[in-house]
Amino acid sequence: MKAELECLPCLVRQAVEEVNISSPDSLLRRKIMRRCFAFMSETDLEKTPPEIAGGIARIISRMTGVEDPYKLIKSAHTKTALKMVPEMDSVISQSDDPFLTGLKLAISGNIIDLGARERVSDADIIRILDEAMSMPLRGVDPGRFKAEIERAGSILYLADNAGETVFDRKFIEQLPGKKITVAVRGAPAINDATLEDARDAGLDRVATLVENGSGIPATVLSDCSPEFREIFENADLIISKGQGNYESLSSSDAAIYFLFKVKCDLVAYHSGFPVGSQVLLKPSDSATDA
């Protein structure tokens, strides 16, 4: 999915927030933002929005020396989500369809996204349980998704944000006996999960963890390691979480199911679902609500 002019205000907001987190020096902040503006003015809009965001983040990191400015925020989000695990377990165990309930929880957890939002509070995270149960799941038939999971010998799960990974874990626990590999970013990228973040969420208990070799807040295969690309190419089924991964992989012909919450007008237009929708999408499959 290519960037459009509408992406630029969001990229600027994100850059300002990251600069403010990374440095208390107002003069340095201004210098960094001027460099970011210059970068955006020269950037090819044929790139995806996450690729441009990755370039901005590299500028900020290089000029401040701060590698992971969202580290404490990511840790806080994960701790808040972990406190909810007993309630998640209760909701899933009492459900008539644990698979569908776990799936809705995972998609609802995609609200923990500082690339698309200015901030995510503890209250936002706590509301995820209610939202997961009350909002419809738009897109393809979850039954078909479940059937493809059951047929798959190997599954690659592309993780997104820290904190959200706790909700991913609860869904993955509904897929017993499957060979599941969870891929995280190879370097810090906004509040996306790194290997450390995924372990904090307990994902290492339910899947094999790998890094994708990239610091872009998405899965841009050309920027990923050869080792990860081999895993990607050999997976029987790929489960892709979040808008960033959708933006970078929506044109791929791989066997991918996209799980995300629509957070902007551009993705709404591209996906065909209104802002706020919780979506399970596989290109060319027929639409439904669950």
Image: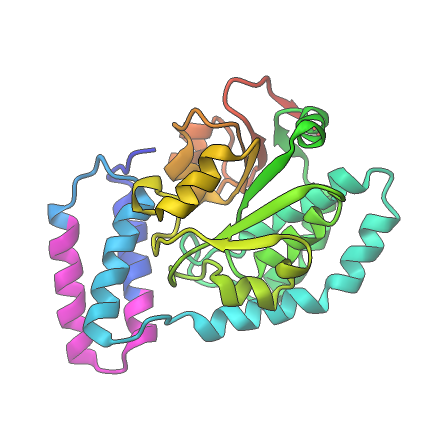
Residue 265 seen: no
| Residue 54 vertical placement versus 259 (above, below) | below
Secondary structure that dominates the magenta span: helix
Q: Quadrant of residue 285?
A: top right
Q: Quadrant of residue 44?
A: top left
Q: Is residue 26 left or right of residue 164?
A: left
| Residue 121 vertical placement versus 250 (above, below) | below
Tell me residue 131's x, y (percent).
68, 48
Scheme by which the image is coloured: rainbow
Tell me residue 86's x, y (percent).
79, 63
The residue depicted at 29 percent of the width and 54 percent of the height is 54
Q: Is residue 184 left or right of residue 26?
A: right
Question: Is residue 34 highlighted in magenta?
Answer: yes
Report the magenta residues as a range: 17-40
Question: Is residue 86 highlighted in magenta?
Answer: no
Q: Is residue 229 left or right of residue 236?
A: left
The residue depicted at 42 percent of the width and 46 percent of the height is 228
The residue depicted at 60 percent of the width and 20 percent of the height is 287
Quadrant location, the C terminus: top right
| Residue 101 vertical placement versus 257 (above, below) | below
Residue 210 seen: yes
Q: Is residue 197 left or right of residue 185?
A: right
